[in-house]
Image (spheres, grey):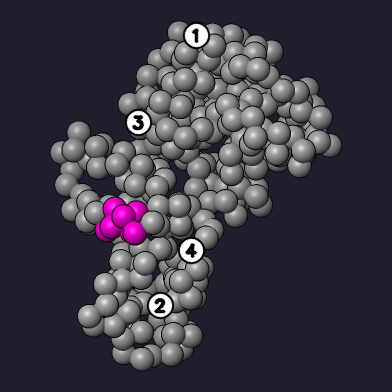
């Protein structure tokens, strides 16, 4: 089947910022959609904005999954995922043998492995498939997907993910997608920690920030965060992108996994503490670049409230 085949019946469970955009791309690609969202307001808003797709609405995850060729979840955390997949009215109570199950939630590797075992017992192709690329990537259909699971499961899911992903990488066995996403978040946290300090350092030195970025942005200091967040960090604009509350959830997974592996993550632990400080001054729903708020603009300041 191709990504534009209308014969694929796809159940999308979770219509948040990421899941809603993924569902829209799938409908636009010609798939027959059934959607489920636990919150009425978000579901109705999505249906209103995407009425032309003609999506069916399910009352439960079990109803959404019953006739589906592909079941996709994109919810909040481990408990949310367990509820929509493994509960009595969860998707796995009705999913058919041979169906594809794709989870795009960022969760622990533990629950990803648990769901993979449940899927195996049901003869379901299961892929733990967290994404990176943020809201902008979801809206544009250019996400990167890190996939854990059997090779045949990942290959069967590739044509579906082509509707909303620019890059799909099979990184290993069940749970490996989630651990790869943890590595991704570890990298981002470290980069933003350094970028925040560099910004305040340059401001304290009364440097022209545009010229500083021009000078250092073409060398080893360059990063996506520098290119896309330096200017907004300098203007104290943080109402976009990936929220600190979600980043702390992800870093918690990474720190737990690191302890289990016997791998110390001191920089990650420190940046996680810094994010807790930003949460304490009301920045939990702001973009992760709001990490800079905890640093003073000048000597004697306490950071921006």
User: Would you identify the image quadrant in which residue 277 lies?
Assistant: bottom left
Between disc 2 and disc 3, the foreground one is: 3
Left or right of residue 164, residue 116 in this image: left
- Chain part drawn in magenta: 274-281
Which disc number belongs to residue 109?
3
Q: CA distance from mark 4 to mark 3?
A: 30 Å
Asked whether the residues under the numbered discs 3 and 1 touch, taking CB atoms below 8 Å apart as contact, a structural biologist would say no
Asked whether the residues under the numbered discs 4 and 3 touch, taking CB atoms below 8 Å apart as contact, a structural biologist would say no
Q: CA distance from mark 3 to mark 1?
A: 22 Å
Between disc 2 and disc 4, the foreground one is: 4
Q: Work out which quarter of the rendered image holds the N terminus and state it.
A: top right
**Residue 211: x %, y % from top left:** 46, 88
Q: Which residue is mark 1?
A: 88
Front residue of 56 and 282: 282
Q: CA distance from mark 1 to mark 4?
A: 40 Å
Residue at screen point 36% across, 91% down: 206
Between disc 2 and disc 1, the foreground one is: 1
Secondary structure of the residue carrying numbered label 1: loop
Which disc number belongs to residue 169?
none
**Residue 56: x %, y % from top left:** 75, 23
The numbered mark, 4 or 3, whose residue comes first in the sequence reads 3
User: Would you identify the image quadrant in which residue 176 lies?
Assistant: top left
Front residue of 120 and 204: 204
Q: Which residue is mark 2?
A: 219
Q: Reply above or below: 158 against 66.
A: below
């Amino acid at each position: 089947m191709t990504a534009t085949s209308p014969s694929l019946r796809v159940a999308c469970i979770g219509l948040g910022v990421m899941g809603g955009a993924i569902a829209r791309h799938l409908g636009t690609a010609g798939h027959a959609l059934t959607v489920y969202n636990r919150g009425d307001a978000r579901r109705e808003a999505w249906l209103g904005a995407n009425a032309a797709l003609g999506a069916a609405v399910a009352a439960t995850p079990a109803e959404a999954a019953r006739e589906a060729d592909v079941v996709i979840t994109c919810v909040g955390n481990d408990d949310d995922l367990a509820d929509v997949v493994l509960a009595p009215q969860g998707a796995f109570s009705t999913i058919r043998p041979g169906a594809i199950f794709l989870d795009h939630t960022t969760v622990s590797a533990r629950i990803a492995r648990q769901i993979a075992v449940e899927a195996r017992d049901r003869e379901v192709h299961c892929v733990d498939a967290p994404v990176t690329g943020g809201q902008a990537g979801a809206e544009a259909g250019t996400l990167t997907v890190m996939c854990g699971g059997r090779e045949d499961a990942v290959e069967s899911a590739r044509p579906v993910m082509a509707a909303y992903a620019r890059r799909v990488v099979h990184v290993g066995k069940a749970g490996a997608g989630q651990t790869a996403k943890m590595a991704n978040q570890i990298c981002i946290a470290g980069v933003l920690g350094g970028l925040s300090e560099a910004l305040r350092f340059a401001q304290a030195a009364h440097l022209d920030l545009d010229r500083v970025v021009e000078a250092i942005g073409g060398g080893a200091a360059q990063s996506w965060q520098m290119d896309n967040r330096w200017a907004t960090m300098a203007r104290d604009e943080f109402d976009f992108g990936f929220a600190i509350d979600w980043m702390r959830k992800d870093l918690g997974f990474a720190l737990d996994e690191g302890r289990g592996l016997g791998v110390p993550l001191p920089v990650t632990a420190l940046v996680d503490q810094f994010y807790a400080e930003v949460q304490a001054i009301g920045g939990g729903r702001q973009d992760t670049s709001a990490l800079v708020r905890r640093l003073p603009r000048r000597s004697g300041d306490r950071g921006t409230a």
